[in-house]
Image (cartoon, rainbow, N blue to C red):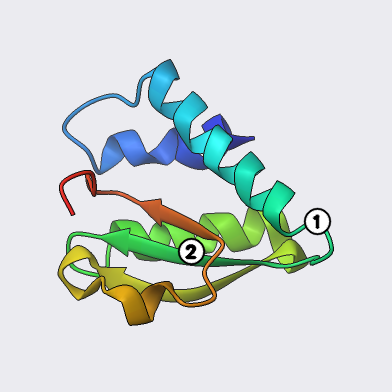
Amino acid sequence: MTREILANMDKFLEWTISDDEVAYVSLHFLAAMERSKESTKFNILAICATGFGAAQMLRNRLETEFGKRVEVVDVIGYYELNQEKLKGIDVIVSAVDLSNL
C-alpha cells in the first residue's frame, strides 16, 4: 500500500524512491497505527518544499487510499514545521528530507 501511495512521487523528485525508503515509510505508518489502536482516524501532516505541489498531491492520494481512516490536518512547507504544528499529529508524510531538523 505504501508503494502505491509513493508511486507518483518519482515525478516530483530527482531520484527514485528506493525499497529501503518505502520500508521506512511503512514502518512509520505501522507505528502510528499501533499508537492509536483505539482511534479509527489518523491525523496526518503533509510536508513539501513550499506547502503546495507535492504535499497537495500527497493529501489527495492519502485521502483517496485511506478515506475515513485518515485526516490530513495540514499541508505545509518544511520551513513552517514547528512544535505547534506537531500537536495531535500521528503521521508525518514528507516529500523533503527532514532528517536535519
In the picture, measured across the screen, residue 2 lies left or right of residue 34, that is left
Residue at left 65%, top 40%?
A: 30
CB atoms at circles 2 and 1 under 8 Å apart? no
Q: Residue furthest top?
A: 19
Residue 37 numbered mark, or none:
1
- Image x and y of residue 9, in percent: 35, 40
Q: Residue furthest right?
A: 38
- Mark 2 / mark 1, whichever is N-terminal: 1
Q: Secondary structure at mark 1?
A: loop
| Quadrant assignment, res 46 | bottom left
In the picture, measured across the screen, residue 43 lies left or right of residue 59, that is right
Q: Could you tell me the amino acid type at mark 1?
A: Lys
- Image x and y of residue 78, in percent: 21, 64
| Quadrant assignment, res 101 | bottom left
Residue at left 35%, top 82%?
A: 84
How would you rate the neighbour count of disc 2 (Cα within 10 Å): few for under 14, some for 14-19, many for 20 or more?
Answer: many
| Of the pair 86 and 7, the residue shown nearer to us | 86
| Of the pair 37 and 97, the residue shown nearer to us | 37
Q: Nearer the viewer, mark 2 or mark 1?
A: 1
User: Mark 2 = which residue?
Assistant: 59
Residue 2 numbered mark, or none:
none
How would you rate the neighbour count of disc 1 (Cα within 10 Å): few for under 14, some for 14-19, many for 20 or more?
Answer: few
- Image x and y of residue 15, in percent: 21, 27
Q: Could you tell me the amino acid type at mark 2?
A: Arg
Residue at left 73%, top 67%?
A: 41
Q: Quick check: 94 above or below 12?
A: below
